[in-house]
């Protein structure tokens, strides 16, 4: 089986699990595109919606496949950097007041 077909099968399974979980929680789940759901809701009396997109990443053009663990690690690193910057800014503002 081609790698793309394997990815599509897994994506379909994950989409179904997410749809079932959201439906069980009382949300309407609408398929708005191939690999995408729209979830309408009302929050504080206002209509809102969340769009959930399920992607099959291809990886880099140099032939290396997508590395989900590397991507998660990079995200965590960036979030930690933002936190440190925010803490430094808050500390600096506190000293100035």
Image (spheres, rainbow, N blue to C red):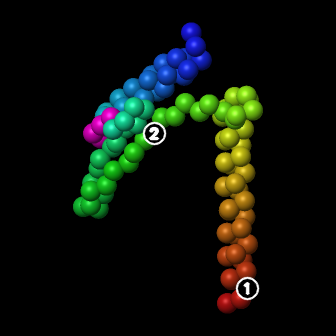
- Quarter of the image where one finds residue 31: top left
In the picture, the disc for residue 95 is 1
Give the quadrant of the C terminus. Answer: bottom right
Classify 75 as above or below 10: below
Residue at 29%, 47% (x, y): give it.
Answer: 40
Residue at 69%, 28% (x, y): give it.
Answer: 65
Classify 5 as above or below 46: above
Residues drawn in magenta: 27-31
Report if residue 29 lies within the magenta region: yes
**Image side of residue 24 versus residue 56, left or right:** left
In the picture, the disc for residue 53 is 2
Residue at 42%, 32% (x, y): give it.
Answer: 35
Q: Main secondary structure of the magenta part?
A: loop
Give the quadrant of the N terminus. Answer: top right
- Quarter of the image where one finds residue 86: bottom right
Disc nearest the viewer among 2 and 1: 2
């Amino acid at each position: 089986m081609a790698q793309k077909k394997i990815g599509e099968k897994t994506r379909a399974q994950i989409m179904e699990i997410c749809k079932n979980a959201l439906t069980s929680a009382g949300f309407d789940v609408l398929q708005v595109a191939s690999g995408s759901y729209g979830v309408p809701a009302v929050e504080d009396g206002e209509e809102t919606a969340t769009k959930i997109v399920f992607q099959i990443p291809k990886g880099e053009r140099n032939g290396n496949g997508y590395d989900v663990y590397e991507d998660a690690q990079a995200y965590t690193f960036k979030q930690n950097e933002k936190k440190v910057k925010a803490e430094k800014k808050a500390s600096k503002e506190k000293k100035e007041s």
